[in-house]
Amino acid sequence: MRCVIMIVCNATCGQLLSAGSANRICAAVGSALALPVTVAVLLAAAAPSAASQASLAVSSASLTQRGESLRWSVTLQHRFSLRDLARDRRGLCLVLEGRRSRAAFAALCVVSSVAARGQARLRYERLGGGGRSGPRFIPAQVRHAGATLTVSFLPRAIRLAYRDLRWQVESLSAPLHCVAAITPTRASRGLSAGGAGECALLYPAKPALARLHVPKLVGCIAKGSSLVFSGPRRKREIALTFDDGPWNDPPSIDFVNLLARYHVKATFFEIGDQISTYDRSGAVERKMLADGDMIGDHTWTHPDMAALPASQQRFQLQSTAAAIRAATGFTPCLWRPPYGDISTPLISLARSLGMLTIYWNVDPRDWSLPGVRAIEANVIGNASDGAIVDMHFGGGPREQTLEALPRIITTLRGRGYRFVTVAELLGLRMIYR
């Protein structure tokens, strides 16, 4: 037997009665009555119209994969506004379940408020045998136009693997009689025990199959300035970059593995002619991309590019891009000039090939082997919001650089920095398939 307690209050009361306080009410009442208790909190609003008391009728819906993201689209049978949904206590949720188990494991609901002026967020709740747990908002793009709502989010935001699943849209309504028989897993959405009818409509009638695959990064799109020294300073982000690999002293995989242990993403600028020598199978480069790192073009043989004729400049860039693509399937949109030597025509040539010219504004001169402490002090002392740090993972013995990374990472992270790739720093769009 389960005791259901319904609390009806105004908006101020609803804000004060948090999930934590509701749980405390559950515990106290349940202890007194020796019964499992569900507490439903509804915001009292102006009496909804007869039309608003019914669930929203869904005309069509889909769940598709777009690169890394999942895109959920719902079209209703009539136009609506997010503000009206909040006022009338109605809503739309996406429920996910296992392909084979058919057990629901997640609910993602579009949440708005009358005061939000049409703005909405996506709330995620994990479902399980014991009911819901851990409701929280996740990053998402929520767009509304006319009768259509479109929501995009990353599966990793809810720790969802890229594998086939089933889904269903629940169109919700919350008049008072809908909480007459609330089940533990449906209480926060105001669903009746049957989960259908006036309180909730399911679309499609049976959960639909969504086929997901692990996205493969195949390229990126250059935008903005063709010559870059640093990123925007409005965020506390920093990009670690490494030149002159792949290499064997130490092996490039040592850099990749260390960064992965510290959950740091970086950008590696590679010399095309060295790929077949030091990463013949392309395994190291593929691991870079799998870890979230970025690969850039550092020419075929590391020449002084500004001194070459245009035909040789083009060969140096295109040959390296082709070698990276052959090893990984990825085509770079970033390149770094050896020795920092550039010219205006060279920058324009690179841009015509789809690549931005990437400089730096922090240079510890690790290529000169100044010592681990000197490398650490230089990077830490010169770090700033939007900085691009130039280091090396090839072209000579690079143990000093590798040994300097742990202290650089922990110190800057302790100061609030987030490590990103150059592409992320510049807000470039990735291409997946």
Image (tube, rainbow, N blue to C red):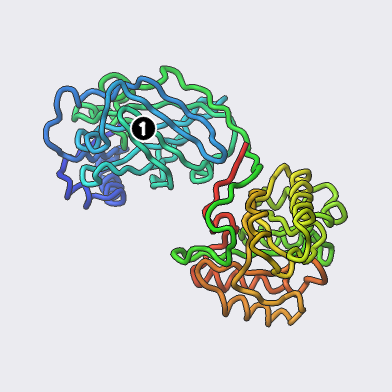
Amino acid residing under circle 1: Leu
What percent of the width, then of the height, locates residue 404? 69, 74
Left or right: residue 98 compared with residue 198 = right
User: What residue lies at 27% left-to-right and 41% top-to-bottom?
Assistant: 118
User: What residue lies at 41% left-to-right and 42% top-to-bottom?
Assistant: 141
Is the residue 346 above or below the residue 37 in the image? below
Is the residue 282 above or below the residue 229 in the image? above
The residue closer to the viewer here, 167 or 239, is: 239
What percent of the width, then of the height, locates residue 173? 26, 28
Q: Quadrant of the N terminus?
A: top left
Q: Which residue is mark 1?
A: 149
SS of the residue at dot 1? strand
Is the residue 205 above or below the residue 153 in the image? above
Q: Quadrant of the C terminus?
A: top right
Q: Quadrant of residue 369?
A: bottom right
Residue 293 appears in the figure: no
What percent of the width, then of the height, locates residue 3? 26, 34
In the image, farthest residue toward the right: 277
User: What residue lies at 79% left-to-right and 63% top-to-bottom?
Assistant: 302
What percent of the width, then of the height, locates residue 161? 58, 39
